[in-house]
Image: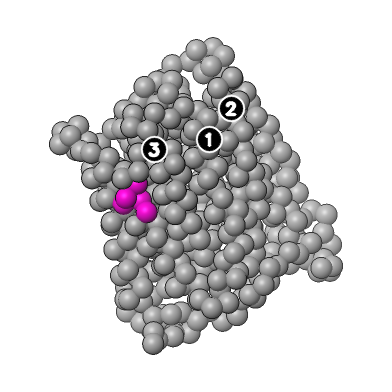
Amino acid sequence: MRSTVPLHNASQMPFWRRPITLLFLMAAAMPVAFSTWSALLNNFVIEVADFDGSDIGWLHTVREIPGFLAIGVIAILMFMREQVLGTVALALLGAATAITAWFPSLGGLLTITMLSSIGFHYYETVNQSLQLQWIDRQRAPQTIGWIMAAGSAATLVAYILIVLSWKTFDLSYNFVFMASGGFTFLVAIFCMVAYPQYEAPNPQLKKMVLRRRYWLYYAMQFMAGARRQIFTVFAGFMMVEKFGFEVHQVTGLFLINLVANMIFAPLMGRFVSAFGERRALLIEYSGLICVFLAYGGIYWFGWGVLIASALYVLDHLFFAMALALKTYFQKIADPADIAPTAAVAFTINHIAAVFLPAALGYLWLVSPSAVFLLAAAMASVSFTLALFIPRHPCPGNETIFSNPLLKAAE
């Protein structure tokens, strides 16, 4: 049986076996599979599977179903520890990514995407919970920023290899999917066997938790999920469909994003610590409004590929500021609520994701600019919600409408 180590004793272990090291290792492994899959996906479905805007919308709708069902994590945690579930989900993501190229049809890709998405979304649900449980609240913004940077650094290596070798060695989609997915799978297996089970000081509730005082967090998660879909599904698809980007060009764009994230994410953590979640999120949402309106301008005014590429990088950077939403919840939450609320929030985040990609796929066929105009409207709603965050959120002071002297009624 695996040994169990109380979290407060973990600091006495060798550095490579501490909880924070495990978080960094998993954070580096996950995006190697997921980000490589994302970089190759649009070219693969257009060149090999002959997708159009409607097909890619359906693919992403199927991909988001496990996110909508992330609340099922609560049931699994009744008989499986969070840490174990996280590594198993990470292994599933890697294995499914590795065999993606074996199924070059709409039906095959929908099936394999569903499997990889179960791994990704269940891993992300558990990972967010573990970060908020294992990282001290005062150090959380900076540490989460560095964890994000570590994921970007690992993916950077993968993207450099793709950019330098895709045409030089005439790589196949199957080889790259196998290499990236296989790496993530092997790291997940290592995490299973090399680390003890860490015991957090606050036992997590193993039932669904919906609390009235978390209403703003729920609302912002819903809008974040709806808005994110438009960027995830259609921004990259536009670069391939409209501007004819090839795999190494798309990957090069991702590469720029990664370098920017490696620099920006730790700075963003420091910014949140210094100025608070409210200001960080207001900057994010106002920036996204401008970016999405400019995306529409690409179709309205015929702007070229350089502007489109710059907007893509800016878009990605603004989304990186969303770590402030995590730390906002950490500040207002009961410690025992973190795991079940992470699952509930992930489900809320994916409500719109289940139907938006397919629905907007049809709208894309009629008017791509209308899709981005809708995204700007969603970012405007998020901006309004962010105005309700107090400067110093805490239990009892979750929104500007709360009485900081009394805990809100449940």
Q: Secondary structure at mark 2?
A: helix
Region rendered in magenta: 96-100
**Residue 329 visible to an observer of this rendering:** no
In the picture, the disc for residue 354 is none
- What residue is at 56 percent from the left and 53 percent from the top? 67
In the rendered image of this protein, does residue 302 appear above or below residue 197? above
**Residue 16 in which image quadrant:** bottom left
**Residue 218 visible to an observer of this rendering:** yes
Q: Tag 1: residue type?
A: Gly
Tell me which numbered mark, 2 or 3, is placed earlier along the sequence.
Answer: 3
**Would you name the residue on which mark 1 appears?**
57
Tell me which numbered mark, 1 or 2, is placed earlier along the sequence.
Answer: 1
Placement of the C terminus among the 4 image quadrants: bottom right
Give percent across and percent down for residue 261: 42, 45
Tell me which numbered mark, 1 or 3, is placed earlier along the sequence.
Answer: 1
**Residue 369 in which image quadrant:** top right
Asked if labels 2 and 1 touch by Cβ distance under 8 angstroms, the answer is yes
**Would you name the residue on which mark 3 appears?**
105
Q: Residues within 10 Å of mark 2 (few under 14, many from 20)?
A: some
Placement of the N terminus among the 4 image quadrants: bottom left
Q: Tag 2: residue type?
A: Tyr
In the rendered image of this protein, does residue 260 appear above or below residue 84? above
Separation of residues labelled 1 and 2 (CA atoms): 8 Å
**Would you name the residue on which mark 2 appears?**
362
**Would residue 280 be counted in the magenta stretch?**
no
Taking depth in this image into account, of 353 and 299 the one nearest to the observer is 353
